[in-house]
Amino acid sequence: MSTETHHDQNTQGHGDFERRDLSAVGIFYFLAGLTAAVVLIYVLLAGFYDLLGRRDKAHQPPVSPLVTNVPANTREIPRTYPQQVFPDPRLETDERTQLDGIRRAEEQKLNSYDWIDQKAGIVRIPIERAMDLVAQRGLPVHPQGTETTAAAQPKKGR
Protein backbone atom coordinates (compact mmCIF):
# COMPACT_ATOMS: atom_id res chain seq x y z
CA MET A 1 0.00 0.00 0.00
CA SER A 2 1.39 3.30 -1.01
CA THR A 3 1.19 6.48 1.08
CA GLU A 4 2.14 8.79 -1.70
CA THR A 5 -0.32 11.41 -2.83
CA HIS A 6 -0.62 11.95 -6.54
CA HIS A 7 -1.36 15.47 -7.63
CA ASP A 8 -2.60 14.96 -11.12
CA GLN A 9 -3.03 18.07 -13.11
CA ASN A 10 -6.37 18.22 -14.83
CA THR A 11 -5.83 18.60 -18.52
CA GLN A 12 -8.86 20.79 -18.96
CA GLY A 13 -7.78 23.46 -16.49
CA HIS A 14 -10.15 22.65 -13.68
CA GLY A 15 -9.02 22.42 -10.10
CA ASP A 16 -10.42 20.13 -7.44
CA PHE A 17 -13.94 21.67 -7.54
CA GLU A 18 -16.04 24.08 -9.52
CA ARG A 19 -15.42 27.57 -8.28
CA ARG A 20 -18.35 29.06 -10.22
CA ASP A 21 -21.19 26.98 -8.63
CA LEU A 22 -22.16 28.96 -5.51
CA SER A 23 -20.76 32.03 -3.94
CA ALA A 24 -21.24 33.35 -0.43
CA VAL A 25 -22.53 36.64 -1.81
CA GLY A 26 -25.27 34.85 -3.78
CA ILE A 27 -26.40 32.93 -0.68
CA PHE A 28 -26.41 36.16 1.33
CA TYR A 29 -28.55 37.95 -1.27
CA PHE A 30 -30.98 35.01 -1.36
CA LEU A 31 -31.36 35.00 2.44
CA ALA A 32 -31.75 38.80 2.51
CA GLY A 33 -34.46 38.59 -0.17
CA LEU A 34 -36.20 35.77 1.68
CA THR A 35 -36.15 37.78 4.92
CA ALA A 36 -37.51 40.85 3.14
CA ALA A 37 -40.30 38.76 1.57
CA VAL A 38 -41.25 37.28 4.96
CA VAL A 39 -41.35 40.73 6.59
CA LEU A 40 -43.38 42.15 3.71
CA ILE A 41 -45.90 39.29 3.86
CA TYR A 42 -46.16 39.67 7.65
CA VAL A 43 -46.87 43.41 7.36
CA LEU A 44 -49.45 42.84 4.61
CA LEU A 45 -51.26 40.13 6.58
CA ALA A 46 -51.22 42.17 9.81
CA GLY A 47 -52.75 45.11 7.93
CA PHE A 48 -55.32 42.87 6.26
CA TYR A 49 -56.41 41.33 9.59
CA ASP A 50 -56.55 44.79 11.17
CA LEU A 51 -58.78 45.96 8.32
CA LEU A 52 -61.04 42.92 8.72
CA GLY A 53 -61.18 43.45 12.50
CA ARG A 54 -62.22 47.09 12.13
CA ARG A 55 -64.81 46.13 9.48
CA ASP A 56 -66.25 43.40 11.72
CA LYS A 57 -66.33 45.70 14.73
CA ALA A 58 -68.24 48.33 12.72
CA HIS A 59 -70.84 45.78 11.58
CA GLN A 60 -71.28 44.14 14.98
CA PRO A 61 -74.86 44.39 16.33
CA PRO A 62 -75.32 46.42 19.49
CA VAL A 63 -75.27 44.60 22.80
CA SER A 64 -78.60 44.20 24.56
CA PRO A 65 -79.18 46.84 27.25
CA LEU A 66 -80.21 44.04 29.61
CA VAL A 67 -76.66 42.68 29.63
CA THR A 68 -74.43 44.27 32.24
CA ASN A 69 -70.69 44.21 32.78
CA VAL A 70 -69.83 43.75 29.08
CA PRO A 71 -66.21 44.18 27.99
CA ALA A 72 -65.47 46.71 25.25
CA ASN A 73 -64.34 44.04 22.80
CA THR A 74 -66.93 41.27 22.81
CA ARG A 75 -64.99 39.09 20.34
CA GLU A 76 -62.14 38.51 22.79
CA ILE A 77 -62.95 37.82 26.42
CA PRO A 78 -60.04 38.42 28.78
CA ARG A 79 -59.08 35.79 31.35
CA THR A 80 -59.87 38.22 34.16
CA TYR A 81 -63.51 38.51 33.04
CA PRO A 82 -65.67 36.92 35.75
CA GLN A 83 -67.22 33.59 34.88
CA GLN A 84 -70.32 34.26 37.01
CA VAL A 85 -71.52 36.94 34.58
CA PHE A 86 -72.50 34.32 32.00
CA PRO A 87 -75.88 32.65 32.51
CA ASP A 88 -76.30 28.90 32.88
CA PRO A 89 -75.45 26.62 31.20
CA ARG A 90 -71.83 27.72 30.99
CA LEU A 91 -69.12 26.10 28.95
CA GLU A 92 -67.05 23.54 30.77
CA THR A 93 -63.66 24.97 31.58
CA ASP A 94 -62.19 21.91 33.30
CA GLU A 95 -64.34 18.98 32.30
CA ARG A 96 -62.26 16.29 34.02
CA THR A 97 -62.40 18.00 37.40
CA GLN A 98 -66.11 18.75 37.07
CA LEU A 99 -66.94 15.18 36.05
CA ASP A 100 -64.76 13.85 38.86
CA GLY A 101 -66.64 16.03 41.35
CA ILE A 102 -69.99 14.74 40.08
CA ARG A 103 -68.84 11.13 40.32
CA ARG A 104 -67.48 11.63 43.85
CA ALA A 105 -70.77 13.16 44.98
CA GLU A 106 -72.67 10.20 43.51
CA GLU A 107 -70.35 7.70 45.19
CA GLN A 108 -70.73 9.54 48.50
CA LYS A 109 -74.52 9.31 48.20
CA LEU A 110 -74.41 5.62 47.32
CA ASN A 111 -72.09 4.72 50.20
CA SER A 112 -73.31 6.83 53.13
CA TYR A 113 -76.17 7.16 55.59
CA ASP A 114 -78.28 10.32 55.45
CA TRP A 115 -81.79 11.57 56.17
CA ILE A 116 -84.04 11.98 53.17
CA ASP A 117 -87.11 13.07 55.18
CA GLN A 118 -86.47 13.18 58.92
CA LYS A 119 -90.12 13.89 59.81
CA ALA A 120 -91.36 10.85 57.89
CA GLY A 121 -88.46 8.71 59.12
CA ILE A 122 -87.03 8.01 55.63
CA VAL A 123 -83.28 7.46 55.53
CA ARG A 124 -80.74 6.67 52.88
CA ILE A 125 -78.48 3.70 53.54
CA PRO A 126 -75.40 2.51 51.63
CA ILE A 127 -76.21 0.40 48.61
CA GLU A 128 -74.15 -2.55 49.86
CA ARG A 129 -76.12 -2.59 53.12
CA ALA A 130 -79.43 -2.34 51.21
CA MET A 131 -78.50 -5.34 49.06
CA ASP A 132 -77.60 -7.33 52.22
CA LEU A 133 -80.98 -6.48 53.80
CA VAL A 134 -82.88 -7.50 50.66
CA ALA A 135 -80.93 -10.76 50.53
CA GLN A 136 -81.73 -11.48 54.21
CA ARG A 137 -85.38 -10.35 54.33
CA GLY A 138 -86.49 -10.69 50.74
CA LEU A 139 -88.52 -8.19 48.74
CA PRO A 140 -91.70 -6.82 50.34
CA VAL A 141 -94.90 -8.46 49.09
CA HIS A 142 -98.23 -6.63 48.83
CA PRO A 143 -101.49 -8.51 49.42
CA GLN A 144 -103.09 -9.47 46.11
CA GLY A 145 -106.68 -8.33 46.66
CA THR A 146 -106.38 -4.93 48.34
CA GLU A 147 -104.92 -2.72 45.62
CA THR A 148 -106.68 -4.12 42.57
CA THR A 149 -110.15 -4.25 44.09
CA ALA A 150 -110.00 -0.68 45.42
CA ALA A 151 -108.90 0.70 42.05
CA ALA A 152 -111.49 -1.31 40.08
CA GLN A 153 -114.58 -0.24 42.12
CA PRO A 154 -116.28 2.97 40.97
CA LYS A 155 -116.82 5.78 43.45
CA LYS A 156 -120.39 6.23 44.70
CA GLY A 157 -122.19 9.52 44.95
CA ARG A 158 -121.90 10.87 41.47
Image (spheres, helix red, strand yellow):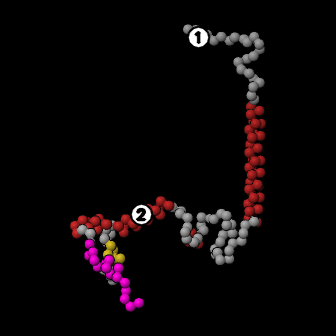
Three-letter amino acid code at the position of disc 1: Thr
Residue 150, image x, y percentages: 32, 81
Question: Foreground residue, 9 or 103?
Answer: 103
Three-letter amino acid code at the position of disc 2: Arg
Determine the image quadrant of residue 104. Answer: bottom left
Q: Residue at (74%, 40%) from the top-left corner?
A: 34
Residue 42, image x, y percentages: 74, 49
Q: Is residue 129 visible?
A: no
Residue ID for mark 1: 3
Mark 2, other Cα within 10 Å: few <14 / some 14–19 / many ≥20: few
Vertical relation: 29 (above or below) 7: below
Residue found at the far bottom of this picture? 157
Residue ID for mark 2: 103
Q: Which residues are magenta?
A: 141-158
Determine the image quadrant of residue 74. Answer: bottom right
Q: Which mark is residue 58?
A: none
Residue found at the far top of this picture? 1
Vertical relation: 75 (above or below) 69: above
Determine the image quadrant of residue 25. Answer: top right
Q: Is disc 1 placed on a helix, strand or loop?
A: loop
The image quadrant where one finds the N terminus is top right
Q: Residue at (77%, 32%) from the top-left corner?
A: 26
Q: Is residue 117 left or right of residue 42?
A: left
Q: Is disc 2 placed on a helix, strand or loop?
A: helix
Q: Residue at (77%, 24%) from the top-left corner?
A: 20
Q: Is residue 116 left or right of residue 19?
A: left
Vertical relation: 54 (above or below) 149: above
Measured in 3D between alpha carbons, the distance from the residue under mark 1 to the one under mark 2, in whole angstroms, is: 80 Å
Q: Is residue 68 left or right of residue 94?
A: right
Residue 99, image x, y percentages: 46, 62
In the rendered structure, does residue 147 fall within the stretch colored magenta? yes
